[in-house]
Amino acid sequence: MTQFSDLGLAKPLLKALAEKGYKEPTPIQAQAIPVVLQGKDLLGIAQTGTGKTAAFALPILQRLAEDRKPAPRRGFRCLVLSPTRELATQIAENFKAYAVHMGLSVHTIYGGVKYGPQMKALAGGIDILVATPGRLMDHMAEKSAIVSGTEIFVLDEADQMLDLGFVVPIRKIASQLTKNRQNLFFSATMPSEIGKLAGELLKDPVQVSVAPQATTVERIDQRVLFIEAQRKRPLLAELFADSSFSRTIVFTRTKRGADRVAKYLNAAGVEAASIHGDKTQGQRERALAAFKAGEMRALVATDIAARGIDVNDVSHVINYELPNVPEAYVHRIGRTARKGKDGVAISFCSDDERSLLKDIQKATRQTIPSFDRRNDKQLAAAAAVADKLVPADRHVDPRKADPRNDVPSELRRKRQRNRNGGPKGRPDGGQNGQGRQAQGKGQGGGAQGQKAATANNAFRGPKRQAAPAEKRWSPID
């Protein structure tokens, strides 16, 4: 049986692994670590929860330790790109745990927090940087991050990068990297667009695949409950009446839907919190910490958080709404049955979601056991009570929903053009009210003009949004 010591890892790494209780490498680790240690490019395909982070973190740490040299100023020796803040934090924590006896620096960069501390950390150089693409591009634009000295480039969860529209930023970042680098791509699935990107950036890669694409963990007990859309909430409350639902993640398609479901669960006496792209970083961290500590039974999340939630002993995953993208189903239910444990995944399916269920079963090559809870009189009565507790949200046909509807509002920012030549956001060309004051003086003169200007400042009426500079959606997290 393969041991970590058989893979050629250094003693400081083996000591850190022993302290964390790791005994045997997972299949993806056993196959990937020797390849990365040899300096070859790697394309790794493995479903979530199989130990992908250690598969690239351990050999990267060893390579950097064997060739010790200072990181370039405002640069980094290894760059790991992650699609979400939670996943970036999780990856960085793993790097730090493995490098505890090696003296290598690890930092994270993502949106939703201040730039100052990030710029300060970058100034002196970093051994390993874990970043989200948008925030890294912001630092690159400000010249506070220089990527040209990167020796190892890692793209984690590449398929979710595609779902969130990060392919263009990734290409822009990669274009500024040195050609003499090692590239590591890891993904749970391999859509054609990601395969194309891998072909552009990888050089003679070794492909490692430990499971067929879009397969689900065998230890997960999966089931589908057919239910009317308006009766999902009482059905959810009915499930939580079972005490075995001790640590449950509930997935919705939209941010507003996540907030509504969490509000309803709290009204029904179930401790719950929501986590999605429009929550501040502090709110997301507090909700996740409370869930990990067992202070709440339910965490309601959207797909943007599906792969950034690494919580032990998640008993159940509930798909309150089926995902638009079939592969997202695999990532959602992969939050349970981790590290060899068992888990349960329950999916609600309304009539207008049947096509989504068909796509999921086709992608995962399985028929999920189903149970019909439609026309349940008890649920119908409970639905009326639920509407009084929390008014029902307007139903949206899932087939017409934007698969990127969970993108944080900060990612949807668009530049504003001043059509009259003044500073950005100031149509009158003035600053700090000076333009309006001058206009008021010109109209009324003297004190009357000042009063007019004051009145204008006091009530400006509804603001008209300037036309966006471009229609293309551009993530900048």
Image: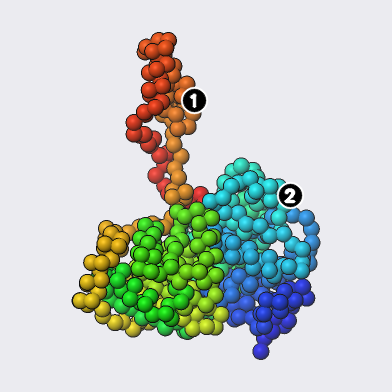
Identify the residue at horizontal 37%, vertical 36% (top origin): 465
Measured in 3D between alpha carbons, the distance from the residue under mark 1 to the one under mark 2, in whole angstroms, is 37 Å
Specify few, some or many for label 2: CA neighbours under 10 Å numbering under 14, 14-19, or 20 or more.
some
The image's colouring method is: rainbow
Q: Nearer the viewer, residue 216 or 442?
A: 442
Relative vertical location of residue 474 with respect to residue 19 in this rendering, above or below: above
- Report the side of 412 relative to 313 (left or right): left
Q: Amino acid at mark 2?
A: Gly
What secondary structure is found at the residue carrying circle 2? loop
Quarter of the view holding residue 50: bottom right
Quarter of the view holding residue 293: bottom right
**Residue 28's x, y, as percent?**
59, 77
Q: Give the residue number, with chain letter if any, for mark 2.
A: 124
Identify the residue at horizontal 53%, vertical 60% (top origin): 286
* Residue farthest toward the top in the current orientation of the protein: 445
- CB-based contact (under 8 Å), mark 1 and mark 2: no
Identify the residue at horizontal 48%, vertical 63% (top origin): 305
**Residue 448's x, y, as percent?**
38, 13
Relative vertical location of residue 22 with respect to residue 164 in this rendering, above or below: below
**Residue 434's x, y, as percent?**
47, 21
Q: Nearer the viewer, residue 5 or 32?
A: 5
- Report the side of 59 relative to 459 (left or right): right
Disc marking residue 372 = none
Identify the residue at horizontal 34%, vertical 72% (top origin): 237
Q: Amino acid at mark 1?
A: Gln
Q: Give the residue number, with chain letter if any, for mark 1.
A: 431
Q: Earlier in the sequence, mark 1 or mark 2?
A: 2
The answer to whether residue 352 of the structure is visible from this angle is no
**Residue 147's x, y, as percent?**
65, 51
